[in-house]
Image (cartoon, helix red, strand yellow):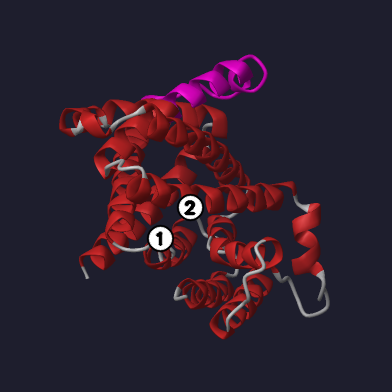
């Protein structure tokens, strides 16, 4: 059961990281914030490099990790953009839909049959998403059309697709390509910092210069977020190295509940009770699918 407690710790760290991210995003745009955070993450992850077994590092696993980092950066920017512009209790629950995406894509493109628990899980995911996005009983179709009309909901969908690919690559790297959790964490933060630096300077003058400059308070919050981010990424990959991706993600998904309830209270989100009920349906659906 060691993996369970590590995955649960990862979920708590992830939830509080999301809450503090929302706070900083009131002042900074997603590109600025992501760039500054990547630098802080890289600096704080320097100690990891002293514990790496460099005999396990090769061009093959680093190439896969770099590609995985490209996907991770794109997903992170999508989430931060949605989180800045949507209520936290609307954004994060949708990210728990990843298992449903995996099950549906496996059915459509790989011909894998859907088991009973997976079908029940998909129904629960759909019910939770419907409750989460519903406005009133008169606008029955609103929860379905919002994903077509809302640009920020489309960012969430993009993040879901990217996270699906990223999660599979996590297991490939640590179980098939001999990349230890310490090596994974250290080199991923090098790639994240490099990629976000390129993006930051590409957007500088268009988007970044129009935003407020970072202040000392923001710096302190970013350092805290960095500690939480490194913590949940490392504990997640450790859990994945011990147990399956499915088991780890099932527990990690509970971060959505903590962030919705606690973050929703802090930021005074609307309809919090309804959204909490929706999250419970979504989590139940994710766990039913991941149990297979």
Q: Is residue 154 left or right of residue 169?
A: right
- Give the percent coordinates (x, y) of residue 238: 27, 52
Name the foreground residue: 218 vs 289.
289
- Going 16% across and 28% down the picture, which residue do you hit? 50
Looking at the rendered image, the quarter that the N terminus falls into is bottom left
Q: Is residue 130 magenta?
A: no
Q: Main secondary structure of the magenta part?
A: helix
- Going 63% across and 46% down the picture, which residue do you hit? 85
Q: Taking the image as drawn, is residue 217 in sight?
A: no
Crowd band around label 1 with a 10 angstrom C-alpha radius: few (<14), some (14–19), many (20+): some
Q: Taking the image as drawn, is residue 204 in sight?
A: yes
Name the foreground residue: 229 vs 53.
53
Q: Which residues are magenta?
A: 192-219
- Give the percent coordinates (x, y) of residue 27: 52, 34
Q: What numbered label is drawn on residue 245?
A: 1
Does dot 2 land on a helix, a strand or a loop?
helix
- Going 32% across and 34% down the picture, which residue do you hit? 223
Q: Quadrant of residue 266?
A: bottom left
Q: Is residue 214 above or below residue 239?
A: above
Q: Is residue 64 above or below residue 240?
A: above
CB atoms at circles 1 and 2 under 8 Å apart?
yes
Q: Which residue is mark 2?
A: 168
- Going 68% across and 73% down the picture, which residue do you hit? 130
- Give the percent coordinates (x, y) of residue 191: 43, 27
Q: Is residue 285 left or right of residue 182?
A: right
Name the foreground residue: 290 vs 109.
109
Q: Tell me how far mark 1 sits from mark 2, CA to CA.
A: 8 Å
Q: Is residue 22 above or below residue 199?
A: below
């Amino acid at each position: 059961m060691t993996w369970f407690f590590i995955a649960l710790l990862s979920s708590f760290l992830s939830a509080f990281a999301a809450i503090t991210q929302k706070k900083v995003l009131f002042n900074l745009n997603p590109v600025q914030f992501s760039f500054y955070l990547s630098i802080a993450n890289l600096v704080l992850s320097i100690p990891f490099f002293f514990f790496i077994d460099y005999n396990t590092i090769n061009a093959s696993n680093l190439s896969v990790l770099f590609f995985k980092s490209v996907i991770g950066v794109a997903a992170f920017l999508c989430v931060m953009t949605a989180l800045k512009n949507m209520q936290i209790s609307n954004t994060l629950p949708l990210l728990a839909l990843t298992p449903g995406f995996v099950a549906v894509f496996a059915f459509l493109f790989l011909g894998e049959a859907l088991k009973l628990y997976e079908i029940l899980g998909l129904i629960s995911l759909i019910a939770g998403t419907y409750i989460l996005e519903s406005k009133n009983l008169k606008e029955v179709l609103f929860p379905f059309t919002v994903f077509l009309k809302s640009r920020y909901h489309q960012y969430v969908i993009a993040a879901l697709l990217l996270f699906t690919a990223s999660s599979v690559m996590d297991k490939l790297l640590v179980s098939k390509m001999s990349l230890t959790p310490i090596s994974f964490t250290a080199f991923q933060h090098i790639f994240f910092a490099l990629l976000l630096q390129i993006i930051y300077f590409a957007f500088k003058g268009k988007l970044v210069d129009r935003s407020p400059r970072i202040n000392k308070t923001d710096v302190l919050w970013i350092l805290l977020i960095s500690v939480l981010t490194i913590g949940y990424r490392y504990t997640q990959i450790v859990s994945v190295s011990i147990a399956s991706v499915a088991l780890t993600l099932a527990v990690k998904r509970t971060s959505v509940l903590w962030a919705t309830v606690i973050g929703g209270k802090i930021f005074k989100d609307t309809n919090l009770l309804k959204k909490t009920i929706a999250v419970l349906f979504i989590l139940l659906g994710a766990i039913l699918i991941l149990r297979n």
